[in-house]
Image: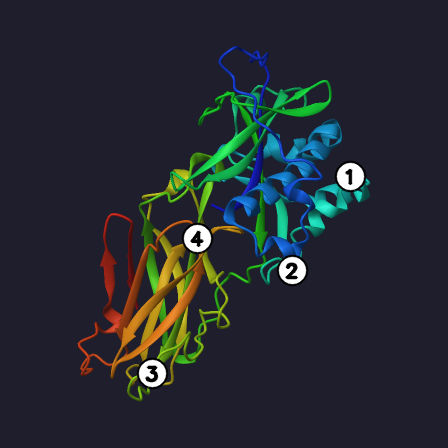
Amino acid sequence: MLLMLFIVSCHTEDFSRTNNERQVVAPTADGPGAYSRSAIEDKSLQEQLDYKKAHLLTISQFISDNLPTVTNHLKDAVYNTPDSLYPLTFDVLTLFEETNLDYSSINGAFEAFEDLDETTWLPSLTIPYKSDPITNGDFETSLPVFAIADYDIGKGEETAVFYKEIEGTLTPTTLEIGENRHFLTMYIDIYGYNPGGNPPPPPANLRLYINKVTPKHYKENWISGRVEVHFSGYKKSYFPPNVGGYCGEAIAGGVACYSPVGKRIKKVKRRHIGDQFNASYTIDNFDTYQNDYVVYYLIFEYDGWPAFKQTTTFSLPNNNSRNIEYRSWNSPYHKATLSMDPNNPYGYPFARTYSYNDSGIEYDLN
């Protein structure tokens, strides 16, 4: 899951504190959030998560303080967009600028994610579904509950910390929200710049591409609203003995070496997990239909900082190996090593007729 903060709201629920709620200590300005960007990169995962929560809480408090302005600006899109076209995503800085909000007092919360781990993380606000407060016309008057995404290191799963406003201040609470359309959800995530998209097809259709894809596993909790299916890969045609290292020759659908982001194949809405879509995602363009190249790649669910920067290794001919980095809380959907020669001496599947199907993903190449 991407680094994120989201907001949920319900018009009629009683949010008064009960004896069963546990007070959660919020990050403070002189705590983890006070680390510099360069310092936080060398801290533990827990300290990085606390750093993230501290700055996302600052952004959340600012939105809470200016909620009438924010909701008034978003209401036309929120009310007039059919449920089938949700989630809706808005760039946070653009939102503030279009509403003439002076966010200079919290500019440090945005700067905290600039040039962090060689990436600038940009905040966005997503409303994942058309909840009851929207369909009932209560978008501007609903009482908000904020939540900041977290990660439980011990359990190895994505979680969230919830906040509600008490006398103007967002106060932590263990209020259980769950996946419930009674609540209005505004989800803010911090995402790394990703060129995404697909290179244009080459002349004569001599491209190798991912044709149809069916993601079957969420690899996200309900909060995020969608799954980011990404690709990273390279090719090689020459294998001197006993050579290792990272990456390989660049391909059209790949990225620069050591980039853990990869390229986005598609953002898949949760409701469409299990549905097939036409990816038509170019892996690479070749001069001939068959050739000596070996192509190796992985398809993975991308998560933002501080999700683990993982490495997967591909064993190649002549005792060669190559590593590819990717950023995710999860293992990849799939990794493959294929040949562009159907009669290759390595026993690799022929790339242009390759297909794969398991409990996590199904796809085919052409």
Spot occupied by residue 105 in the image (x, y as percentages of width and height): 80, 41
Q: In what element is the residue under mark 2?
A: loop
Foreground label between 4 and 3? 3
Residue type, numbered disc 3: Val
Q: Mark 1 or mark 2, which is nearer the start of the sequence? A: 1
Disc 4 + disc 1, Cβ < 8 Å: no
Nearest the viewer among 219 and 365 is 219
* Marks 4 and 3, how far apart at CA: 27 Å
How many numbered tags mark residues here?
Answer: 4
Q: Mark 3 or mark 2, which is nearer the start of the sequence? A: 2
Q: Which residue is mark 3?
A: 243
Residue 115 shows which numbered tag? Answer: 2
Classify the position of the C terminus by image quarter: bottom left
Spot occupied by residue 81 in the image (x, y as percentages of width and height): 57, 35
* Marks 2 and 3, how far apart at CA: 33 Å
Q: Mark 1 or mark 4, which is nearer the start of the sequence? A: 1
Q: Which residue is mark 4?
A: 328
Residue 99 shows which numbered tag? Answer: 1
* Marks 2 and 1, how far apart at CA: 27 Å
Disc 2 + disc 1, Cβ < 8 Å: no
Residue type, numbered disc 4: Ser
Q: Residues within 10 Å of mark 3 (few under 14, many from 20)?
A: few
Q: Mark 2 or mark 4, which is nearer the start of the sequence? A: 2
Q: In what element is the residue under mark 1?
A: loop
Nearest the viewer among 362 and 219 is 219
Foreground label between 2 and 3? 3
Q: In what element is the residue under mark 3?
A: loop
Q: Mark 3 or mark 1, which is nearer the start of the sequence? A: 1
* Marks 4 and 2, how far apart at CA: 19 Å
Query: By what rule are the colours in the image chosen?
Result: rainbow
